[in-house]
Amino acid sequence: MVLLGIEGTVSFADKLASSESFKLLFREGMALVEETAAYLDGDGRDEAKQLSRLAALAYATESMRLTTRLMQLASWLLLQRAVNEGELTQGEAAAEKRKVRLTEQLISTGPQVLAKLPPRFLNIVEKSLRLQGRVLHLDRLLNPAAKGAPEPPAMPLEPQLELLRAAFALSD
């Protein structure tokens, strides 16, 4: 999204990515990475030992998906912070980002088995999914042409006006 300013266009996404909101998102993401690592190396390991065979398999699967998701998110957040702090240009970050492959990773376990997993683990997974949604949204705003996201039209109502013109055979 682009806003018109007195001296030209200003990218809302760029402003958002370098705002206090981004700094909060960054801190939240890094804190979640730390929380997850501490849990999986400590209490999570003990809780996993008490699970049934099927639940233990689901736990292992979802913990791998969780760590992959968080590594992608942390990499993206670190790249964006580097851009914000002038350590990388947007082009350099885009080249690095291709290596990160930020993708949407959802839960693959069915609800009956998922319900048997430790509540604290499920809470961390849920937090990671919310963080993923926020990061993916910001990434689409910053890179609208990436990943098949539609480029926002220069005049947002123009497509609708064209449809109306065609429907009523009107001209300018």
Image (tube, rainbow, N blue to C red):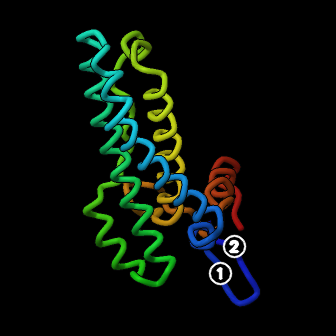
The CA distance from mark 2 to mark 1 is 6 Å
Q: Quadrant of residue 5?
A: bottom right
Judging depth in this view, the residue of 43 and 124 nearest the camera is 43
Q: Residues within 10 Å of mark 1 (few under 14, many from 20)?
A: few
Marks 2 & 1, CB-CB < 8 Å contact: yes
Q: How many marks?
A: 2
Q: Which mark is residue 9?
A: 1
Residue drawn where x is 31% and y is 37% of the image:
65
Return the x and y of residue 102 as percentages of the image width and height: 35, 53
Is the residue 121 above or below the residue 91 in the image?
Answer: above
Q: Residues within 10 Å of mark 2 (few under 14, many from 20)?
A: few
Please tell me whether mark 2 sits on a helix, a strand or a loop: strand
Q: Quadrant of residue 39?
A: top left
The mark nearer the N terminus, 2 or 1, is: 2
Return the x and y of residue 168 as percentages of the image width and height: 70, 49
Judging depth in this view, the residue of 117 and 104 nearest the camera is 117
Say which amino acid is labelled 1: Thr
Is the residue 21 above or below the residue 32 in the image?
Answer: below
Return the x and y of residue 115 as percentages of the image width and height: 44, 14
Quadrant where the N terminus sits is: bottom right
Residue drawn where x is 42% and y is 63% of the image:
145
Residue drawn where x is 25% and y is 62% of the image:
99
Say which amino acid is labelled 2: Leu
Q: Is residue 126 left or right of residue 56?
A: right
Please tell me whether mark 1 sits on a helix, a strand or a loop: strand
Is the residue 35 above or below the residue 83 in the image?
Answer: above
Residue drawn where x is 39% and y is 18% of the image:
117
Q: Which mark is residue 149?
A: none
Judging depth in this view, the residue of 62 and 13 nearest the camera is 62
Is the residue 141 above or below the residue 35 in the image?
Answer: below
Say which residue label 2 marks: 3
